[in-house]
Structure formats: C-alpha cells, structure tokens
Image: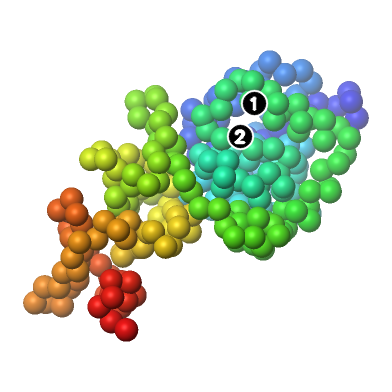
C-alpha cells in the first residue's frame, strides 16, 4: 500500500468498552482511518466485505459467530491483516501466533498495543499479509486454534482471565470445581467464589483438558476429581454430588460415559 494512503482499520469486539479502548489508543497513531466498528460476528463479516479494511482488530470470543467463524466465512485468502484480541492465555495462542500478524491478550497495556500495531502497519505497508494465508488456513482446518498448525498435541487452558468491578484477575484452571452456563456467559466456580466470563460452554469444553473436565450437561462442566457420588432419583433422572456438597444434574445421554470414568461399568 502507498505510504501516503491512510491505514484503514475495522474494530470488532462485542464489548463497547473494549472497542472504545482500541479507538482511544489509535487516536495517537498517524495516518490511520477507523472505517467502522462491529459488535458481533455477523456485522463483522458484512463490514469486512463492504468496507474492505487494511487491518482488523478481531475479538476471538464473541457470542454466536466467533472471531474464527468470521475468518471461516470470509476465507483466509480474502481476510485482511488481522490482530486477534482475546482473553486466552499465551499457551493457547501458539497457532494464532503463526497465523495472525499479532495478538493482544486482554487486559493489554499501551506498550503491548504499540508493538502489535507497529508490526501490523509494517506488514501491511510491505504488502506481506498474503503470506499468512496458508498458516491461517491451517489453523482453521486444525480446529480453530485448539492446537498448533502442525497437528501437535493441543494446548489446554491453564489460566482464565476474569473481570470484576473493573479489575482483572487470573483464575488457575486447577482451582475450578465446576462451570455453569449463565445465558450467553459462563460462571466459573473456584475456591468458593463465582466468576462470570464472556465465553460459550462449547468453547470452554474444547479448551479444557478432557482428562480433567467433563461436560455432564449442556449447562454444566465439572472437574472430574471433584465428583463424590453419582445420584439417581426414582424418576430416572441423574445427578452428581461434588466434594463441596454441590449437586448438579447429569444429562441421560452422558451418564454412560460418566459411569465408565467412575468405574461403574466396563
């Protein structure tokens, strides 16, 4: 792209405050134009096709169509330069590191943003974005970031960032007792506290080690070593009692697999 042409930027995040933060940081950059914003995946696809930005800051975790779903819809060859924005820790981002120009892990500071933006501008101006298409395609075919592009063993989450009253803390996965659905959000229950995060249960199920966590119901994931008892009432419904005394329902189609893990069936 010509050095005199403004860098056209699209911001995609379902949180208004996150979009505003990016806008505030970009105000200090020379020769750029924010051509639009989008607060969900469908709007992002439409904006990319209509506005044809040079660079997209793309939230990975959005209800409905995720950031990776956006890329699947647009297609790796037609996707503009992309900086992923995510709450995933760096261990879960090895594939993204190969496929994106850069990534920002929430909460990121001004210096980290400057590094990512400088790299993005440089690659766009050098017209080197196209060389990332094959890596990006490999990430999508490999399950959307759950493993490396080479097919190596997937990296499971070890920490999850949660925000409470404007402060961000990290919850070690090893402290999580169980997770429940709360509308489009999920609640992590750890060390006697509940933390609401903006994440789908399906995504969490995929990103947690299946040797340690099991989805017993569409609205519940439990840490297996916390299960004390499998319950069955006279009506034929199932549940589990955890070491803490909490009781959770178990879907009938998941009982057999859970019984095998507990050694109740061969």
**Residue at (40, 41) in percent of width and height:** 172
Tell me which corner region of the image, top left, top right, bottom left or bottom right, holds residue 117.
top right
Q: Which mark is residue 15?
A: none
Q: In the visual, does 130 lie left or right of 47?
A: right
Looking at the image, is 19 positioned above or below residue 59? above
Q: Which residue is mark 1?
A: 113
Q: In the visual, does 2 lie left or right of 114?
A: right
Looking at the image, is 24 positioned above or below residue 121? above
Of labels 1 and 2, earlier in sequence is: 2
Name the secondary structure under disc 1: helix
**Residue at (89, 25) in percent of width and height:** 3
Q: Which residue is mark 2?
A: 104
Q: Name the spot of residue 264 as percent of width and height, x first.
A: 25, 78
Name the secondary structure under disc 2: strand
- Marks 1/2 in contact by CB < 8 Å: the verdict is yes
Q: Quadrant of the N terminus?
A: top right
Q: Quadrant of the C terminus?
A: bottom left
Q: Nearer the viewer, residue 182 or 260?
A: 260
């Amino acid at each position: 792209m010509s050095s005199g042409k403004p860098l056209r930027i699209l911001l995609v995040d379902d949180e208004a405050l996150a979009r505003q933060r990016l806008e505030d940081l970009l105000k200090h950059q020379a020769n750029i134009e924010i051509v639009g914003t989008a607060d969900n995946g469908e709007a992002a696809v439409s904006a990319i096709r209509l506005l044809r930005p040079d660079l997209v800051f793309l939230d990975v975790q959005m209800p409905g169509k995720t950031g990776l779903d956006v890329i699947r819809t647009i297609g790796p060859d037609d996707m503009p330069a992309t900086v992923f924005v995510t709450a995933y820790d760096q261990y879960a981002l090895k594939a993204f590191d190969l496929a994106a120009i850069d990534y920002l892990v929430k909460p990121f500071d001004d210096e980290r943003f400057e590094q990512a933006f400088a790299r993005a501008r440089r690659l766009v101006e050098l017209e080197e974005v196209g060389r990332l298409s094959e890596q990006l395609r490999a990430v999508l075919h490999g399950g959307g970031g759950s493993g490396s592009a080479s097919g190596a063993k997937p990296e499971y989450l070890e920490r999850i960032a949660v925000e409470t009253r404007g402060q961000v803390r990290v919850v070690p996965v090893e402290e999580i007792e169980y997770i429940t659905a709360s509308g489009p959000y999920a609640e992590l229950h750890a060390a006697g506290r509940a933390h609401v995060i903006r994440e789908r249960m399906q995504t969490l199920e995929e990103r947690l080690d299946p040797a340690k966590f099991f989805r017993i119901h569409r609205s519940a994931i439990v840490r297996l070593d916390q299960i004390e008892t499998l319950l069955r009432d006279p009506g034929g419904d199932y549940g589990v009692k955890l070491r803490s005394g909490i009781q959770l329902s178990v879907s009938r189609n998941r009982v057999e697999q859970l019984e095998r893990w507990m050694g109740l069936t061969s």
